[in-house]
Amino acid sequence: MKDAKTTEAVRTDYHVHPDYSIDAIPVKIREYCCQAIELRLKEVCFTTHFELDPVRRQVNNFVFFNGRKHPADNLVWLDSYFKEIEDARLEFRDIGLEVKAGIEIGYAPGLERGIESVLEAYPFDFVLGAIHCLDHISISSKQESARCFANHSLHEMRERYFHALREAVQTGLFDCIAHVDLYRRYGLEHYGPEILTIHRGVIEPVLEKMARRGMGLEINTSSLRRGIEEFHPSREIVSLAVEAGITVFTVGSDAHRLGELGEHIDEVLALLDEFGLCNHIFTKRQAIPGIENGCGTGRQAAAGR
């Protein structure tokens, strides 16, 4: 059994949506930081949504800024975002909380230049990449996903999703891939349990490419609050990631409201420990193990993996 000190040392949440994300409850960065202190988190990274698909320009290519929806690609909002994060960093560091500047970017093939522009312009600590849409339709939305899934067989959806994922990894633009089996969120209801195994035979080379690039894999706990039995990704995919050589993992609640911050973090840390791994933190896009005594005390670590 891990001691309490070790567990506390690695308690981080690297997927948090403050009031800049248009689908989030309007909770300020400072409010999240106060809650993080209450939860004994050691580090929190804010990851506002950033969507650039021109086909969806009038749907969700916005942030919330100055009391209204603001085009995400008008980057003036990032000046305010970084200032709030820096103010929080200075306020909370001396009481034991590190605050990091991140972003969650929705990827689709063809958006590379726009993504590069924002990453070159601002000094993010952490960049999450995600596949939120297929054929310009959101699979992370209950309403839109029904339309997307109705238009495609399971095989077609599988091909489209993993093509986009391969392209996202190939760009090398991201530090980490978020909720890599997000299609399970609403796809399970539409396609049935067969969807739980569609990754087999197609995700392995993607994970190997991530490992070669040093890219991280997020374990996202939001699935549990939606009634799904496993994290994003499933334990099987985590195991495949370990076999592929991925060593960088982050833990994120995908909080869109204050009460979701830090949800199920300890359970993820326990899962990683079983594989002899630990979560990672990022500074200026460089990954660092999030535990002082080295990653993991679990069975694979003991065996030397």
Image: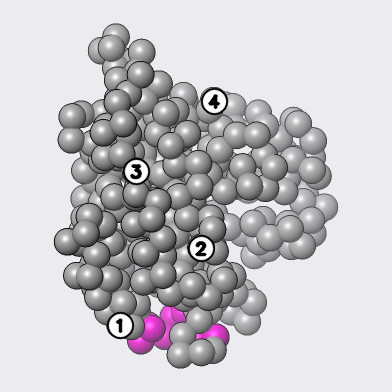
How far separated are the C-alphas under marks 1 and 3? 28 Å
| Mark 1 / mark 3, whichever is N-terminal | 3
In the picture of the structure, the residue carrying the numbered disc 4 is 236
Q: Secondary structure at mark 4?
A: helix
Q: Secondary structure at mark 3?
A: loop
Q: Nearer the viewer, residue 177 or 1?
A: 1
Q: Position of residue 231 (x, y in %)?
A: 56, 38
Residue 178 lies in the magenta-colored region? no
Q: CA distance from mark 4 to mark 2?
A: 30 Å
Indicate which disc, 2 or 3, sits on the residue closer to the N terminus.
3
Mark nearer the viewer, 4 or 2: 2
Mark before the other along the chain sequence, 4 or 2: 4
Q: Which residue is mark 2?
A: 258
* CA gap, disc 2 and disc 3: 17 Å
Closer to us: mark 2 or mark 1?
2
Q: CA distance from mark 3 to mark 4?
A: 23 Å
Q: What is the three-letter code of the residue carrying label 4? A: Glu
Instruction: Give the labeled residue for mark 1.
Output: 79
Q: Nearer the viewer, residue 157 or 47?
A: 47
**Where is residue 292, by image quadrant?**
top left
